[in-house]
Amino acid sequence: MKRMSGVLLAAMLLLGKLQAQQVSIIPQPAKLEVLSGHFLINAAVSLQYNEPALLKPVADWFKAAIADVSGIRLSTQPNAARRIVLQLTTPVKPTDESYTLDVSANLITIKAKSYGGIFYGMQSVLQTLPAIRTNALLQVPCMRVQDAPRFGWRGMHLDVSRHFFGPEVIKQYIDLMATYKMNTFHWHLVDDQGWRIEIKKYPKLTSVGAWRVDQNDKVWGSRPQAKAGETPTYGGYYTQAQLKEIVAYARQRNVTIVPEIEMPGHVASAIAAYPELSCTQQPQLPLTGGDYTNMSSNYCAGNDSVFTFLQDVLTETMAIFPSTYIHIGGDEVDKGPWKKCARCQQRMQQQGLKNEEELQSYFIQRIEKFVVSKGRKMIGWDEILEGGLAPEATVMSWRGEAGGIEAAKMNHDVVMTPGSPCYFDHYQAGPEGEPRAIGGMNTLQKVYSYEPIPAELPADKARYVLGAQANLWTEYITTAEHVEYMVLPRMLALAEVVWSPKETRDWQGFNQRLQPHFRAFEQKGLHYSKGNFTVNIKPVSANGQVQVQLSTEAMNGAIYYSTDGSEPNVTSQRYTSPFTLQQSAVVKAVTVIQGEVMGVKAASQSFVLHKAVGSAVQYVHPVSRYYQADGLNSLTDGIRGMHAVGKFWHGFSGKDLVATVDLGSSKTIQQVTLGCLQRYNDWIFLPQSVMVEYSIDGQSFTTLGTVSNTVSSNEKASIIKDFTVKAAAVKARYVRVTAKVIDACPKGHSGEGKVGWLFADEIIVE
Ligand code: ACM
Ligand code: ZN
């Protein structure tokens, strides 16, 4: 072997590194080795494959994709000097999506045990080529790839009920999924505001249920109900022929479509078509938006003809969709109508069901039996756990991960799709400057950081987690462009979460590989979010001091900030590391890229310094795991909550907030304030009263004072209220605050009689 000079070696390593950077495959392959040189695709290249019965569709698809970006038709010449060879290896194993890809100057070989594996090998090749037709040479870098997905369920959901998207939009959605190796399309075909799947036996489901009075000029929540005499003009549905064509289109791209036939709630559209399916059996018009007043939204669980109807609907559905899984919904069933219905109550009596949760379980189990009898598996939202899980059900965990964990512990398969970070109808940036979203904040980095196997799940149960999925509900999304925007680029982050080995996950590397994909979106005219430029302002409190930590998700973004209320710009202080506040202040910060302030509005956060900042807090009832704000000491972090729920609010469900602050040493105090929130629509209510006690030893407490709430729990506007107890100065080391939660959600509220939430942001001791 000839020895290379050090300089030459260094140059080659550098070259290797540069080349490695040029291969920006998303999701990152399990093993990728970039070599020098490339395979040139031109008219002299042939495409060959064994097993034509299986591989012809995938070869045809690849030829079309190459023709799209080059105009070149690959030949089938067996003796061509340069060849692309697809090789299905035995034993064929349809569920094994792994592949190997070898690219050398004259030969590209893709080997796999399944159609899907071959397809993904080709997707990896395509990602190295231009996204659209250009005059550029088509050069595939020489490389060796050994790749396999981490999870079998790599899902994307789309709600086509709240707004309807035609077959071409669906195909494009499937194409985008396939590009990033997502393999499961959860198609939400049924909901209150539109029935979208043609069922030949029940034509009114689509002739009536698919059409509503057009209120698209108004935002979802403020759409009035249809009035008698108004004509339904907005909507649409897919014919069975269209659905079958889309199923075949998806199959060619290794995408399985899991249809969702929602039940027993969220079916006002079906009831508009066939009122006899509901408990009240009253006629109604399809919903126009979010106003459910006097609408029936449930099937009657006491009426056997409902089950006959659903079996017929499922039979036609299964004839269209060959998927193993059939999704039956099961979420958010308002049990109220069942409580008032004689037939439902009679069913409960006959079946010995203790409550309406068990009635729901009866409903779902009866449907599962039917689905299983047809050789399929049933999947439903995590509410199907209530009242007892159907014996073979797979659970889709959306209200956090708790349902998924519970089901996996019972040896049931689960798919993780927790609202945070898997709901892509939430904001990904801003919210200033962003299209209106349903709320919440699921940024690209948050999605990228998601781990589908919860830490608290015992290791031997991890295998029940089939994978993860993002959901796109479309109450606020009316156009295909907006669908693209919500999905891009977050789907790419999720793709890497569910495909790539956990140990290859690397936010910086992902961000770098993302850049050419952004250019591809631009070339293809796809709408996408350029990123979350809003600076994250995070308090870090310790030893009575508040430190402020600033971060940005933007690649190569610098942060500039002010603490005097002024608008920050490139002449402001540049952030390097967490800083300490000496007095109460409003911190404002912006992301700057190449000298330009990014985003619409500076991030802004108010900090309040007081005697308890940084102090440890003990709770009698634990803070909800869903609303921990920035950690267990949120109530003494010196940071005030804002109207946007979730951020910096500590949440307590149904129980009083009883918090004891340890000031560390005896201090003179004369005023204690608890900041609280009311958000009627989110079931968050101000406490009935707030009592403050103090103590020297932490054992015996003396009351400093109590204040009562004067705001009605029926007040619907978002309210932030400070409950302040003021007294003569005393010496104390411990301060105990007791905020009494309201007994129940008020009369007329959607949670009437159920427990509400208490949200607090800070215990201010002065
Ligand atoms: C859901 O988001 N209601 C499943
Ligand atoms: Zn009923």
Image (cartoon, grey):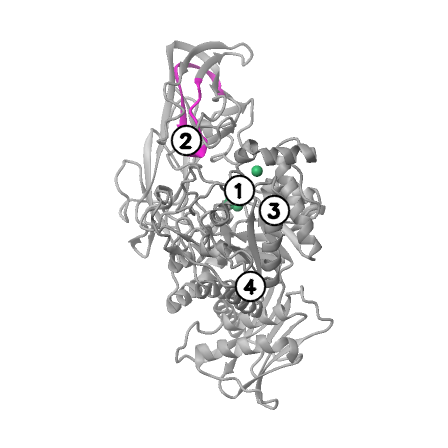
Q: Which residue is mark 1?
A: 278
- Outermost residue on the bottom side: it is 79
Main SS of residues in magenta: strand
Amino acid marked by disc 1: Ser
Q: CA distance from mark 2 to mark 3?
A: 38 Å
Q: Is label 4 in a helix, a strand or a loop?
A: loop
Query: Compared to 408, does 613 lie above or below?
Result: above
Identify the mark nearer the N-term, 3 or 4: 4
Q: Which residue is mark 3?
A: 305
As rendered, which of 716 and 238 lies closer to the eye? 238
Q: Which quarter is ligand 2 in?
A: top right
Question: In the rendered structure, does residue 686 fall within the stretch colored magenta?
Answer: yes
Whether residue 419 is visible to the viewer of this picture, yes or no, is no
Quarter of the image for the N terminus: give it.
bottom right
Question: In the rendered structure, does residue 399 fall within the stretch colored magenta?
Answer: no
Left or right of residue 411: residue 360: left
Q: Which residues make up the magenta segment?
A: 661-689
Q: Which residue is mark 2?
A: 680
Disc nearest the viewer among 4 and 1:
1
